[in-house]
Image: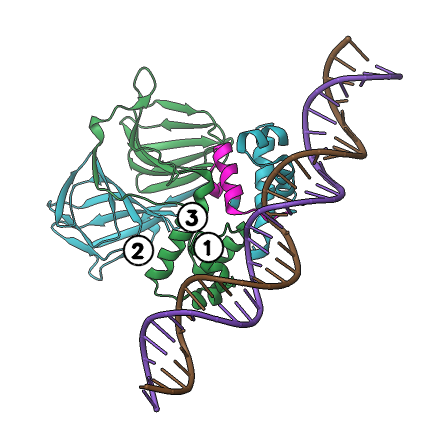
Chain colours: A cyan, B green, C purple, D brown
Amino acid sequence: METEQIHKKIGRNLLAVRKSRSLSLDQVAELTGVSKAMLGQIERGDSNPTISVLWKIVNGLHISFTSLIENEEPTVSVVHIEDLTPFGEEDGEYRAYPVFPFNQQKKFEIYKVEIDPYCKHESEAHNEGVEEYLLLVKGKLKLTIDQESYIINEGSAIHFSADRPHIYENLSDEMTSFHTTIFYSS
Amino acid sequence: METEQIHKKIGRNLLAVRKSRSLSLDQVAELTGVSKAMLGQIERGDSNPTISVLWKIVNGLHISFTSLIENEEPTVSVVHIEDLTPFGEEDGEYRAYPVFPFNQQKKFEIYKVEIDPYCKHESEAHNEGVEEYLLLVKGKLKLTIDQESYIINEGSAIHFSADRPHIYENLSDEMTSFHTTIFYSS
DNA sequence: TACATATGTATGTTATAATGTACATAGTTA
DNA sequence: TAACTATGTACATTATAACATACATATGTA
């Protein structure tokens, strides 16, 4: 996508939203506070709107900004996690399987992680704004972050900011596994 | 946040990114192809940039649009899933626990789902652009979508577009459970 | 069929976005 | 200390964003 064409893509996406809701330009103008003439220009790709105008549009239509600037190609894909090559320590006691890799559009990735009995993994700080959503599958996990420790048992989950160092520890005598969704806000 | 102030927020966020990377306006101008004078105006909130200019900036700096328009408050939260009230059928054979509810900023939500032996759940089409990322925890699942069926065993996962009807079936004689991340692109 | 209304586009006007250049200030070096 | 460089802001110019209004066409109704 060339940098000078984003306004044309926005036009197509805005038109698609409007058509899917069977709204006229007049109605969108009322909902958004942007003039009918300007909305028409934007949809035809004839004009390069400012951020304030786009902000009015997304707020008035209750859509997300990203829905105007991005597209997608839905597909079905089955993943056999045991076939994946995990990231982890050289001695293999911590294994992170990239089940659904990072995608710029979605800004998250999903791993299945396994930690052997009584082993731990020290994670450096991710970039600012990175968060983790972790659901325990099996075993028992101790997470340490900001000098606080949290015990996560089966049937529990934890959400935390991962932009500071943190430690995962398996406190039990059997393997611990969990699913973690890492969200990158920037 | 008033709609007429988004350009000021963008200015603050852009300045924060630049400072965190110790870049001068000249360097950002080179990276992005946007004039130094304009970058200064944007940072000071003195100007309301067009979408094309912002596009140049995010591409040149390798950041996301959302990092310019949004902010966040990181927290740690532990969730005990068994304490949650699930969504599901009246007879309780399909239970969806909202572990991490939807958040407009992140645009996804995460459920733990349980289906009793030999039971199924028919899901209507979600809105256009909705996708699911499903990781099996326990048991065996059959997913049917677009007249195609997929068997998901333990250790496997599946990603599909959820904007059309689909059916989850537990084919085994024990409870099936899985984690699913539902992503809303718009 | 004639008329009224809805809808999207064209046009002209005004304000401002975006740039190149000049300028003021701070920091560094000889 | 003087000269040079880096940095961000001010200023003037040009192109265009955004609007209000007019217009052309399509649609619906009596």
Residue type at mark 1: give it.
Ile
* Residue drawn at the location 45% of the way across and 47% of the way down: B7
SS of the residue at dot 3? Answer: helix
SS of the residue at dot 2? Answer: loop
Q: Residue A2: in sight, yes or no?
A: no
Q: Are marks 3 and 2 on the same chain?
A: no
Examine the rendered structure and indicate whether residue B169 appears above or below residue A140.
Answer: above
Q: Disc 3 designates what residue?
A: B8
Q: Position of residue A157 (x, y in %)?
A: 22, 37
Question: Could you say which is closer to the camera, residue C22 or residue B143?
Answer: C22
* Residue drawn at the location 65% of the way across and 38% of the way down: A37
Q: Residues within 10 Å of mark 3 (few under 14, many from 20)?
A: some
Name the quarter where the N terminus of chain B is drawn: top left
Which chain is home to disc 3? B
Q: Are marks 3 and 1 on the same chain?
A: yes
Q: Residue B108: in sight, yes or no?
A: yes
**Membership of A63 in magenta stretch:** yes
Mark 3 or mark 1, earlier in chain:
3
Which chain is home to disc 1? B
* Residue drawn at the location 24% of the way across and 56% of the way down: A125
Q: Residues within 10 Å of mark 1 (few under 14, many from 20)?
A: many
Q: Position of residue B43 (x, y in %)?
A: 42, 55
Question: Could you say which is closer to the camera, residue B12 or residue B174?
Answer: B12
Cα distance, mark 2 to mark 1?
24 Å
Residue type at mark 3: give it.
Lys
Cα distance, mark 3 to mark 1?
8 Å
Q: Is residue A68 left or right of residue C29?
A: right
Q: Disc 2 designates what residue?
A: A127
Q: Which residues are magenta?
A: A47-68
Q: Position of residue B93 (x, y in %)?
A: 31, 20
Q: What is the number of the mark on residue B42?
A: 1
